[in-house]
Image (cartoon, rainbow, N blue to C red):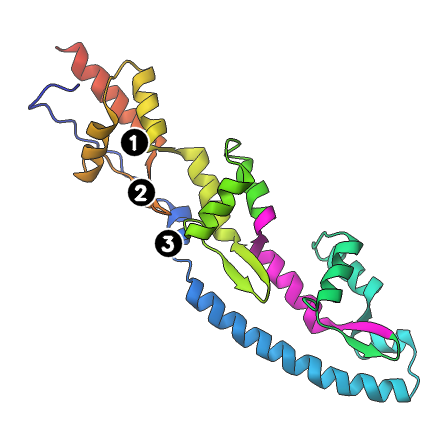
Amino acid sequence: MMPRGKKIVIETEIEDEFIDKYRSIDLVGIKARRDNVEKGLASSVASVFKVAQNLYKQKASEDELEGKHELFSVRSAYDYLKENGVYISFRAFGGRIERGTVPFVKVGRKRFIPKAILEDVVNTKSEFFTVKEAYQEYKKSNPQINFRAFIGRIEKGSVPSVKFGTRRLVPRDAVDALTHISNNYFSVSQAVKELHKNGIRLKRNAFERRLDRGRIPHEKVGGRRFIHEDVLQELVDKEVALRSRQ
């Protein structure tokens, strides 16, 4: 334990854009914008449906549908997504169409997907991860976490997520921030272990009291407190120096 009357002042200041981005994630705003997008897409699909019926009566060719009217066959739609960085299996893509998560119009017996729908899929992919993708990305920096625990964090809201229709998605900024934290910060328990490794026998409750009093700079993310590695290193160095003078 640190002798009474001796206070260590941590001078390291951390400005972290990743945590700033994390805190600026506005789930309500995201949902409101998504509602507007879905209204626009529904209107677009409705108007395309009318066009498709007329084209069927006119016996338009598939090339004409794709080239002039920007309606993609299922295979062409899949290829378009793949070319734009959306990598899913053809079977999974077909499943989304069957479930209606990817809207389509029918021209005769064939299904076609409007380009606006495909562009929305691409845009969504660039801004969000599926829950499984988010877990796989986060696990690279935090191998100890299992999928069930990650799901638990989403359910508790410590990992922000939104629902688009039936799909739950995690903002990429959130995953980037959590990955960054795993690589550059210590949790409270990790910090106490690190102190012990350096011969500083500080109990967890004493360490947490210092956090409570603001004596150790830290960040609170998702209901948990994290200490930057540079802050902890300064604490270790000053604790060791203080003990050497005793």
Q: Amino acid at mark 3?
A: Arg
Q: Quadrant of residue 78?
A: bottom right
Q: Secondary structure at mark 3?
A: helix
Q: Amino acid at mark 2?
A: Glu
Q: Calculate the distance from the C-alpha at mark 3 to the C-alpha at mark 2.
A: 11 Å
Q: Quadrant of residue 190?
A: top left
Q: Amino acid at mark 1?
A: Val
Q: Is residue 127 above or below residue 139?
A: below
Of the residues under marks 2 and 1, which one precedes in the sequence?
Answer: 2
Question: Is 181 left or right of 136, judged from the image as shown?
Answer: left
**How busy is the neighbourhood of tag 3: few (under 14 within 10 Å), some, or many (20 plus)?**
some
Residue beneath label 1, please?
Answer: 231
Point 88% across, 84% down: residue: 56
Q: Calculate the distance from the C-alpha at mark 2 to the C-alpha at mark 1.
A: 11 Å
Q: Position of residue 20 (x, y in %)?
A: 37, 51
Q: Position of residue 204 (x, y in %)?
A: 25, 27
Residue 113 among those drawn in magenta: yes
Q: Is residue 185 above or below residue 193?
A: below
Of the residues under marks 3 and 2, which one precedes in the sequence?
Answer: 3
What is the magenta range?
A: 110-132
Residue beneath label 2, please?
Answer: 219
